[in-house]
């Protein structure tokens, strides 16, 4: 069942009609964007906090290079997570992602061909 919501905007009585399905689509897109932004913050915030703190503190706040490398790679990991997040939440992206992976790795993702039926020859 689909409901229609009518909103009257402004003095010109402009009517905007939106169905519940479009509201669901917008809600899903907003949720996906929120997750993408949240993952971005989780991955890059440690690096930017380190950068600001060491810039303001100077020489007394010397940090081992291993820590800096780990912070960089946590940020870079965000780029690896984005396609996975989009593939999980978006059906169209999931299909395109699957097709791309099948082109890149055809022998790993293609289903095994069925074994020939030899019973008719016996």
Image (cartoon, rainbow, N blue to C red):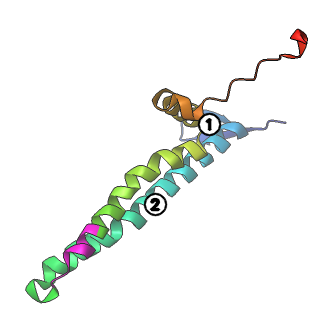
Identify which residue is drawn at 44% across, 57% down. 37
User: How many angstroms separate mark 2 from mark 1 (CA)?
Assistant: 20 Å
Position of 17 compared to 78: left or right? right
Measured along the vertical axis of the image, is residue 58 above or below residue 42?
Answer: below
Identify which residue is drawn at 47% across, 54% down. 36
Which of marks 1 and 2 precedes in the sequence? 2
Identify which residue is drawn at 72% across, 40% down. 20
Count of number-bearing discs: 2
Image coordinates of residue 29 in percent, x first then y, are 56, 45
In the foreground, 75 or 15: 75
Residue span colored magenta: 62-69
Q: Secondary structure at mark 2?
A: helix
Mark 1, other Cα within 10 Å: few <14 / some 14–19 / many ≥20: few
Image coordinates of residue 40 in percent, x first then y, are 40, 59
Measured along the vertical axis of the image, is residue 50 above or below residue 24?
Answer: below
> From the image, which quarter does the N terminus lie in?
top right
Q: Which residue is mark 1?
A: 91
């Amino acid at each position: 069942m689909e409901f229609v919501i009518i909103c009257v905007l402004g003095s010109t009585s402009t009517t905007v009609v939106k169905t519940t399905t479009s509201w669901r689509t917008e809600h899903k897109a907003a949720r996906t964007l929120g997750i993408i932004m949240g993952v971005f913050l989780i991955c890059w915030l440690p690096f930017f906090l380190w950068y600001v703190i060491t810039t303001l503190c100077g020489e007394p706040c010397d940090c081992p290079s291993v820590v800096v490398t780990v912070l960089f790679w946590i940020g870079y990991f965000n780029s690896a997570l984005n396609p996975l997040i989009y593939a999980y939440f978006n059906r169209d992206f999931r299909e395109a992602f699957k097709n791309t992976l099948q082109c890149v790795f055809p022998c790993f993702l293609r289903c095994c061909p069925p074994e020939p039926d030899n019973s008719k020859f016996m």
